[in-house]
Image (cartoon, helix red, strand yellow):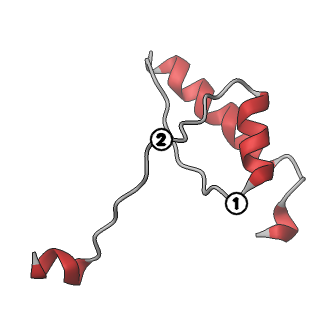
């Protein structure tokens, strides 16, 4: 939500996630960011993330699953 942006919450969350990943000896972290969220994308790039512009999410809701 806009009122929570720019307060360091995202950076603090990333610090916790990366600490856990190091503690658990993870080899990769992956998360999603919606393409209009420029501030988040800029933050992720700033800390070294590679943004994949090739993959798209394909979601099926419960009723679609049942119909398939």
Quadrant in the picture for the C terminus: bottom left
Residue at 40%, 56% (x, y): give it. 57
Q: Which mark is residue 36?
A: 1
**Residue at label 2?**
54
Location of residue 64 by image quarter: bottom left
State whether residue 11 appears in this view.
no
Depth order, front residue of 32/3: 32
In the image, residue 37 lies at what x, y percent?
Answer: 72, 57
Q: Earlier in the sequence, mark 1 or mark 2?
A: 1
Residue 40's place in the image compared with 29, above or below, is below
Quadrant in the picture for the N terminus: bottom right
Report the side of 60 relative to 11 (left or right).
left
Residue at 89%, 52% (x, y): give it. 7
Depth order, front residue of 17/47: 47
Residue at 34%, 60% (x, y): give it. 58
Answer few, some or many: residues within 10 Å of disc 2's Cα (few below 14, many 20 plus, some between 14 and 19): few
């Amino acid at each position: 939500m806009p009122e929570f942006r720019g307060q360091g919450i995202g950076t603090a969350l990333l610090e916790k996630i990366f600490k856990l990943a190091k503690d658990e000896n993870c080899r990769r972290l992956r998360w999603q960011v919606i393409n209009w969220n420029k501030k988040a994308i800029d933050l992720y790039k700033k800390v070294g993330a590679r943004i994949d512009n090739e993959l798209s999410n394909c979601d099926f809701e419960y009723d679609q699953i049942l119909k398939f």
